[in-house]
Amino acid sequence: MLGRMQDWPLTVDRILDHAKSWHGDREIVSRSVEGPIVRTTYAEAHIRAKRVSNVLKGLGIGHGDRVATLAWNTARHLETWYGIMGIGAICHTLNPRLFAEQLVYIINHAEDQIIFTDLTFLPILAQIRDQIPTVKHIIVFSDDGHMSQDLPGALCYETLVNDASADCAWGGFEENTPAGLCYTSGTTGNPKGVLYSHRSNFLHTLVTMGTDVLGVSATDTVLPVVPMFHANAWGIAFSAPGVGAKLVMPGPKLDGASIHELLESEQVTFSAAVPTVWQMLLGHLRQTNGKLTSLKRVVIGGSAVPEAIVRGFRDEFGVDVTHAWGMTETSPLGTLATPNHRIAGLDAESQLKFKLKQGRPPIGIDLKLEDDEGKLLPRDGHTFGRLLVKGPFVVGEYFRGDGGQILDADGFFDTGDVATLDSDGVMQITDRSKDVIKSGGEWISSIEIENIAAGHEKAELAAVIGVFHPKWDERPLLLVKLKPGEQGTKAEFLAFLEGKIAKWWTPDDVVFVDDIPLGATGKIDKKLIRQRMADYVLPST
Ligand code: AMP
């Protein structure tokens, strides 16, 4: 027997349909690549998205075909997502911060047929154009007047959209139809594709709308700084229209001054970004004595949020920070550090300890911790192990089966993160499993040491890696990039760590470097650091 409710496949085109029908006059405001602020509404975006669908059909795109975007967060990019997904084609987001050869690999692996892009990225595409044979057309988000001649044969978005009919049926396919494709940043081996379904995106949207998750509402004005090209802008391109929130798209300008201008001019109440963006904003506000007159809440994730950011927002600007963890493979939101009833009862200082952790799983996400032998570890807040995750919007298999079987016998996916879980169910990342330092069979968290070292007043950036040691297998090495004009000594950095970490975690050496490299997604590139330090030998060996 089956339930007797209506058959209503969970396809994401319904989200923009809903926004058009019930929040049609709600605005989408974009900082365009050409410069000016452009205003549209969900009703207009819906019409234009349908026109995009007809453009695609006219160019021969059908069900299951891959159509890529290499673009900033703007209303045009949003329309294009829905235009692609609405007809059952697959929207493949390309990250412009990847190296050219990685883009070539990804585009060829996905067999993308069309790429929608901004004027900004034409030089990258011109450089790789003859290496991506499956791509039949490149469509530039521009009007005729701004079209560039940098890439011969490229088509003009506005001309195509204006000439296309807005009459196009969306949906009508099975909810497990693929909707989106996003490749992992590939710090080890080739990037692998995560193929989201309409159903997984729809469920992720419903879950992230929850009050303890993103909790955006129809009364919010939402500014996603998190790019649509990396981990789906944390689902905001679905959740904001889903609730009818006003959407403010920052386009190409992500510096402190530009973000501040939009936060104030559009009276933004909610925003989301990685820590470096907020660091730049706070720096700008302090320099200019700027104010935040409408912002209430920011969600910060992608890498661990430093305490100084949480305190800065809270104490200087009255803005609440929610720390979040997730990954491309989890659609991406996995946990959020919103308080449960017990934590909510604590005073602000005691709550801070929890706010700095990565948070609790919402419905739809299950977590477990295991040691290297697969033994389940306790939720005691200090034992750390491999973090595994399971749920309806977690990857089951990579695109084209790359990497083979990736789930354990119970259907859990190994995140590659090392974490603790406490008795409140709050998770804290202590490392990536490939970065954790294995010293005499015990694990040392490289991230914990580098976060503390980065808090030294002379440090601009700090990184910790494990280096070979004949007795202990590996010992920690601290690399420090000093602020301009500063001088530092090994002794003062080791003294700074004393009492803040276990004695046996103390780095065996401190090396001052001119550069700590960051990868395409803004995280410290430890693979490159390890390569650079390949010939380094600890003084103790
Ligand atoms: P990506 O798939 O590129 O978004 O990278 C996902 C990875 O980023 C996770 O597996 C974590 O290692 C890291 N990450 C994401 N959010 C956080 C966070 N709040 N704190 C620490 N690491 C994080």
Image (tube, helix red, strand yellow):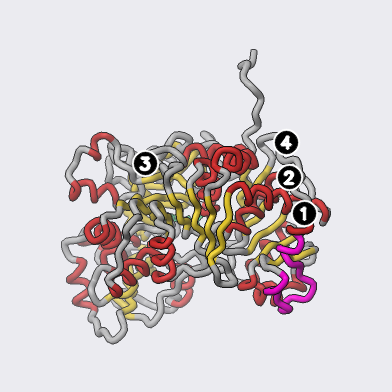
Cα separation between marks 1 and 4: 18 Å
Of the residues under marks 1 and 4, which one precedes in the sequence?
Answer: 1
Query: What residue lies at 63% left-to-right and 16% top-to-bottom?
Result: 4
Cα separation between marks 2 and 4: 9 Å
Element marked by disc 1: helix
Mark 1 vs mark 4: give the one in front.
1
Q: Which image quarter holds the N terminus?
A: top right
Of the residues under marks 3 and 2, which one precedes in the sequence?
Answer: 2
Report the image quarter containing ligand 1. bottom left
> Are there few (<14), some (14-19), or many (20+) residues within 10 Å of tag 4?
some
Q: Quadrant of residue 268?
A: bottom left
Q: Which residue is mark 1?
A: 56
Residue 25 on image: x %, y %: 55, 47
Q: Which residue is mark 2?
A: 87
Cα separation between marks 2 and 1: 9 Å
Per the rendering, the mark at residue 360 is 3
Badge 3 residue CB within 8 Å of ligand 1: no
Up/down of 444 relative to 524, above or below: above
Residue 116 on image: x %, y %: 69, 62
Query: What residue lies at 38% left-to-right and 45% top-to-bottom?
Result: 336
| Residue furthest top as drawn | 1
The answer to whether marks 3 and 1 mark residues whose Cβ atoms lie closer than 8 Å is no
Residue 169 on image: x %, y %: 75, 40
Q: Is residue 156 magenta?
A: yes
Q: Name which residue type carries label 4.
A: Phe
